[in-house]
Image (cartoon, rainbow, N blue to C red):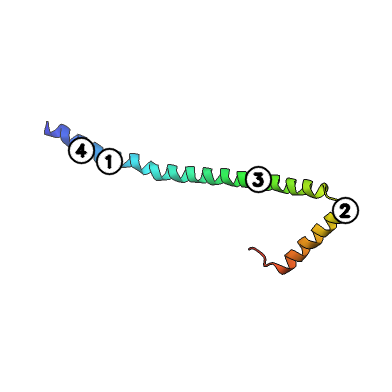
Amino acid sequence: MLLRYKYIIIFLTIFVPGLYASGPQEAKVNYKKIEREKKQKDKAAQKEYNKAVKAHMKHQSPETRSMMKSSKKAAKKTLPQNH
């Protein structure tokens, strides 16, 4: 009877900690997946934004477009760059 308990205790001490070791690895995989999906969404959002800006510029009169371009260039010269 005592021998049976000994084997059960040995079994539990060897195999049970291994079950919990896979938890952090799975969390890391999920984190990478979430980051990858976020990058894809950000890229799609930036693409949509650029498309909307281009469409907005297209609908303006030539005088307005030239003023917008010149003000954009002036802003690039005066404002600090975001790195």
The local crowd at label 4, few if under 14, some if 14 to 19, many if 20 or more residues have their Cα within 10 Å, is few
Q: Which callout, 3 or 2, points at the residue further toward the start of the chain? A: 3
At a point 57% along the width and 43% down the height, the residue shown is: 37
Q: Earlier in the sequence, mark 4 or mark 1?
A: 4
Mark 1 lies on a secondary structure that is helix
Q: Nearer the viewer, mark 1 or mark 2?
A: 2
Q: Residue 56 appears at what percent x and percent y? A: 78, 48
35 sits to left or right of 72 = left
Q: Secondary structure at mark 4?
A: helix
Amino acid type at circle 2 is Pro
Q: Amino acid at mark 4?
A: Ile
* 47 sits to left or right of 11: right
Q: Are marks 3 and 1 in contact (CB under 8 Å)?
A: no
The residue sitting at the right extreme is: 62
The label shown at residue 9 is 4
Bin the neighbour count of mark 3 within 10 Å (Cα to Cα): few under 14, some 14-19, many 20 and up: few
Closest to the observer: 41 or 79? 79
Mark 3, mark 4: which one is toward the viewer? 3
Foreground label between 3 and 2: 2
Q: Are marks 4 and 1 in contact (CB under 8 Å)?
A: no
Instruction: Identify residue for label 2.
Output: 62
| Picture layout, residue 67 above or below residue 56 | below
Badge 3 or badge 4: first in the primary sequence: 4
Q: Are marks 2 and 4 in contact (CB under 8 Å)?
A: no
Q: Quadrant of the C terminus?
A: bottom right
SS for dot 2: helix
Q: Amino acid at mark 1?
A: Ile
| Picture residue at 72% right of the left edge, 69% below the top | 78
State left or right for residue 78 relative to residue 18: right
Name the residue tied to disc 1: 14
- Give me the C-alpha separation between circle 2 and circle 4: 83 Å
Coordinates of residue 41 in the picture (x, y in percent)? 61, 44
